Image: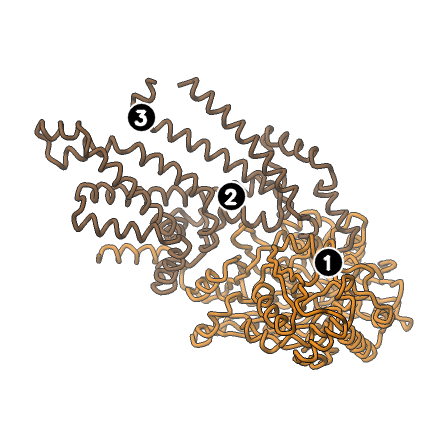
Amino acid sequence: MKRLFAAAGLVTLLAAPAFAAKDSVTLGMQLEPPNLDPTGGAAAAIREVDYLNVFEGLTRIDESLNPHPLLADSWTLSPDGLVYTFKLHPGVKFHDGAAFDCSVVKFSYERAVAPDSTNAQKGYFEPIAKTECPDPNTAVITLKRPTGRFLYLMGLSDSVMISPASAAGNKTNPVGTGPFRFVKWVKGDRVELTRNDSYWGKAPALKTVTFRFVADPTAAAAAVMAGDLDAFPNYPAPETLDQLRADKRFTVAVGTSSGKVIMSLNNARKPFDDVRVRRALAYAIDRKALIDALGSGGTPIGSHYVPGDAAYVDLSNTYPYDPAKAKALLAEAGVKPGFTMTLRLPPPAYARRGGEVIAAMLEQVGITVKMENIEWAQWLDQVFGKATNFDATIINHVEARDLDLYARDFYYFNYKSDAYKAIYAKYIAAADPQEQIALAQQLQRQLAADEPAVYLYAAARTSVWSAKLRGMWVNGPIPANDMAAVSWAD
Amino acid sequence: MLKLLLSKTLALLATVLAASLVVFVVLQVLPSDPAALMLGTEARPDTLAALRHQLGLDQPGWWRYLLWIGGLLRGNLGVSYTYSVPVAELIGARIGVTLPLALLSILLSTAIAIPVGVLSAARRGGPADTALMAGAQLGVAMPNFWLGILLILVFAVGLGWFPASGFAGWDRGPLAALHSLILPAFALALPQAAILSRVTRAAVLETLGQDYVRTARAKGLTATKALWRHAVPNALIPVVTIIGLQFSFLLAGTVIIENVFTLPGLGRLMFQSIAQRDLIVVQDLVVLLAGSVIVVNFAVDLVYMLLDPRIAAR
């Protein structure tokens, strides 16, 4: 027996890394990115590895969604709100040595709107009429119409700067201007980044950053507790949080996200085309009880916007929990007790477990809910893609400030409102920040009144990291793990 | 022998072709659009069309099938939709995890099961037999993912002897790589060993009752010698059959254990590519696994011949 223990000890010694001042961080992520090019795919995992680490845009978005100068040192806007003149930071180089200048800006934005572009947010670039380069360090961007959110949109991960020389290879070998350069990607296991020693800005404290992909929540909890991982943003095992909170080795941080968990209704299908029915469903759901039952935190909401964003207006009490009122509204709309609706549920717990809770609540007002579990690919194809073959679904809309969804001619919940579209047109054109906020609030009120979906709660973002780690983002309004300012305390 | 080899190769090709057709048709029927999965909920129709064109998804199904099979015959497995790298490269890297893991667990399970099975057959009805078979019963009943989690909690989280998850990679040396495979190998091997030990026990019990064992004892061999020289070798054919089945299972069925231990193996690749509708990877993997099952069966047939020369003479 003694020998067995000795042998095991030897194995442990062989595997242990050499002792040195710690300048590396290993982060856990549940999903592996499909590729590493943020301009060629929608997956949040791409951004969680790349954004602000490998790739940078003209502006950057901070933890509160405000744009700041990044590759553009400063800018001016013409009085008519149509011409942005960006002063670019001089002497910036891509990781492969290629120079960053105005020609790169022109290339990146034109590539994003090209006919063969696979940028998931092509719409961001649609307002751009042309990009001109009077000199290498000046970019003049002319818009087709005033676009108040332009600096914000150009700071997001879909708008990062791409070098013509490396654009084609970014899916597997990303080359950007950021503080970390890509080292390798062991598919199915990890991505490794290392410090960019010739970074144009402030050098990061960390030498290496490794992203490890741990899909299973139990495995994630074990890897954190065993010390294999230094941090796990968006921690997937809420049932172990109490244990981690009690353990001095860890920090458990609960922040906000841009995720809005909603029960989307098919507004084109009877009886959900009747606003009384949609409001009745809203009255029938006890949001607080739902959040408690799910155990992963959150704040009740009444519209498609999250607290913490400057333009948020609290409408969570528009339809307070009131089963009697729900029943009355249903009767008024001619929905008989025993009416059956189908709720299609994608895999995450908020949908599957949340669906069960909501089904029980709707049962109380005389609605029978048939739950149908589907996987993501099916959800995208059948609910989102075809948008005809569903009554209701539960989904977390994770995109920040995505009020445009309701202004689209076609979107899966089939909401059609000319009043909303009119306010939205003013909102995207508004250049004055105060006016923009006022219009965003009008949009939220319009949605709360029409209730095209039952707004449930703003999802919390719970993360776990080593108690000695400094500088991690607590809030996650956009998918990102900005590692430039992260360091170890002594 | 040559005839056998030829007929096996033909069977291999026919099975692989049938498997390829079945998996292709099934994946076409599945509700999915790989391009929509990659571009998410904000994508515009023209962007989707551009990506579908890049992936070749705008071509008719029969033409895509022919392109794929034509590529396979020339040794070209195609390019993954999601990762945009050759599938051969993906599979190659993953085999380096799954194959050693399967070999290690089959070694462990055999090394545990044969002595246990033989011992309990020899001590039939005794306390050792009762204890070992009770243990085996427990092993059969234990799901391997549960055992995996238990091993992680005790040896990784509690004692810290092994990493809780992940694969160190062969580039960090064979010791580090094996170190990260030990717990998953045990989690896979113990339930398999439980089954194998029961099969071994039953087979040895049967041969122990045969005339030739009695004859061996009559001509003066001790009970132990008769057991190891005559009863055990003759009991090996069913044992080898089970080992062959288990090996196929381990190659294809490590999905769950690879998820529990977060190992970048074939099982996880299969799981991920199904979820992401990386159809070409799924197709290649199914063909590969179908082929490997047939190869393993063939190897088992060869071992039969070694164990029992009468089979080869037939």
Amino acid, disc 2: Ala
Residue A388 point in image, percent of width and height? 75, 56
Chain to which mark 3 belongs: B
Chain to which mark 2 belongs: B
Q: Nearer the viewer, residue A211 or A233?
A: A233
Chain B image colour: brown
In the rendering, which numbered label is found on residue A161? 1
Task: Evaluate whether label 2 is on the same chain as label 1.
Answer: no
> Does residue A398 show up?
no
Amino acid, disc 3: Leu
Say whether residue A64 is left or right of residue A268: left
Q: Nearer the viewer, residue A90 or B129?
A: B129
Residue under pointer 3: B306
* Residue shown at the point (73%, 47%) measured from the top left: B51
SS state under label 2 = helix
Residue under pointer 2: B93
* Residue shown at the point (65%, 62%) measured from the top left: A343
Residue A194 point in image, percent of width and height? 56, 58
Q: For residue A447, what is the image quadrant?
A: bottom right
Between label 2 and label 1, give the one nearer the viewer: 2
Residue A47 point in image, percent of width and height? 64, 60
Give the letter of the orange chain.
A
* Residue shown at the point (57%, 73%) measured from the top left: A471
